[in-house]
Image (cartoon, rainbow, N blue to C red):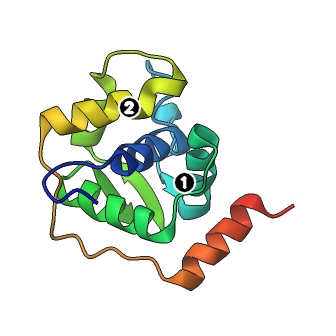
Amino acid sequence: MAEAGWDRSDAWIFVSVVIGGGAGRHLRSPNTRRPEGVPLAGLLATAEHLQDAIPARDEVETAIQRLCGADLVTVQDGFFRLTQAGERLWRTRPRSGLSSTVDTMHGILTRSRPPGSGSTWSVTEAEYTAAVRAAFAP
């Protein structure tokens, strides 16, 4: 992980929160989004869809800590959700295809603000494994 700036995996997890939570849909109607956000299993499934890989437990944990510390994402009752600042950042990005969205957001994060610190959110190995099973079990 880069000490001074955002990692690409931070952007990957941010975009997964956005898409998994439905904030990327229905731009005209905020009340059509899922108010509760996205659970860990949904975040992992979305991340896998975006990059054809499942993020490692430590990638998720570090990214969420940095995103929460920067006031872009919150975690409440097991659901990940964008903050108003996170939603503003997402809404003002240049539009691009899904394949380049993570790279686009990585650039925006890098230019907009430093990664946050101070968040103590964590996920145990057992919680992570259960979420992987829930997301990818046949």
Give the residue at x 31% y 52%.
73
Q: Of residues 75 and 15, which is closer to you in this image?
A: 15
x then y, percent, for residue 83: 28, 47
Q: Which mark is residue 43?
A: 1
Give the residue at x 58% y 84%.
126
- 123 versus 55 height, above or below: below
Q: Which mark is residue 94?
A: none
x then y, percent, for residue 26: 51, 23
Q: Of residues 133 and 25, which is closer to you in this image?
A: 133
Q: Quick check: 72 left or right of 132?
A: left
Residue at numbered disc 2 = 103
x then y, percent, for residue 52: 64, 44
The amino acid at mark 2 is Asp
The amino acid at mark 1 is Leu
Secondary structure at badge 2 equals helix
- 50 versus 63 height, above or below: above
- 30 versus 13 height, above or below: above
